[in-house]
Amino acid sequence: MLDVFVQMPGASPEEISQRVSLPMEKLLREVPGVEYIYSINQLGMSMLIVRFLVGSKEEDAIIQTHNKLYSNFDRIPPGASQPIIKVRSINDVPIMALTLWGEHYDAYQLRRIAGELKTSLKQLDDVSETTIIGGQPRQLRVVLDT
């Protein structure tokens, strides 16, 4: 499997989906051996998970994916970053996914709670990686009064 990341700061998840993820999905379906493509769109970022058929050579998959994306980079909208391709092995597949929800909590509060949970989980010996997806990250906004 490969993860493909593209950033487009300030773009909504809907805009990311339409302008970045869907065109990349169409391109990547042309890569030999691609079995499945799943995209995650969030504020300012697209992540595509590209799964190849069992038995596909990892090196070939990386090269063909890289070539397909970079030879068609002119189709990526202005403001989008170059794709970053990260290899994922069977050992990288999540063994646990948690969804936080609370009737009296907003997206920012839930992300803070997720951050505290992430810190606690990373202290465990057998935890190699934790990732937070979604929520509202902390931001500093400066408004100039002229």
Image (cartoon, rainbow, N blue to C red):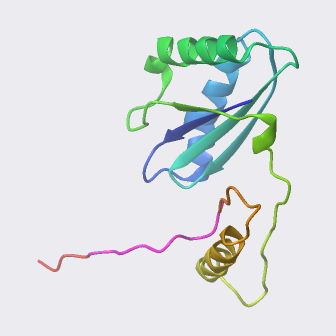
Q: Residue at x 63, y 18 (%)?
A: 62
Residue located farthest toward the front when viewing the structure as drawn: 125
Question: Position of 2 compared to 79: left or right?
Answer: right
Picture quarter containing residue 127?
bottom right
Is 82 rendered above or below residue 54?
A: below
- The tally of labels here is 0
Image coordinates of residue 78 in percent, x first then y, are 38, 33
Residue located farthest toward the left when viewing the structure as drawn: 146
> Is residue 140 one of those drawn in magenta?
yes
Question: Position of 81 compared to 112: left or right?
Answer: left
Picture quarter containing residue 29?
top right
Question: Position of 23 compared to 10: left or right?
Answer: right
Q: Residue at x 66, y 59 (%)?
A: 131
Is 10 rendered above or below residue 92?
A: below
Q: Quadrant of the C terminus?
A: bottom left
Q: Nearer the viewer, residue 13 or 123?
A: 123
Q: Where does the magenta region start and end? A: 133-142
Dominant SS type (magenta): loop
Q: Nearer the viewer, residue 30 or 118?
A: 118
Q: Residue at x 67, y 72 (%)?
A: 123
Image coordinates of residue 79 in percent, x first then y, are 38, 38
Image coordinates of residue 43 in percent, x first then y, are 55, 55
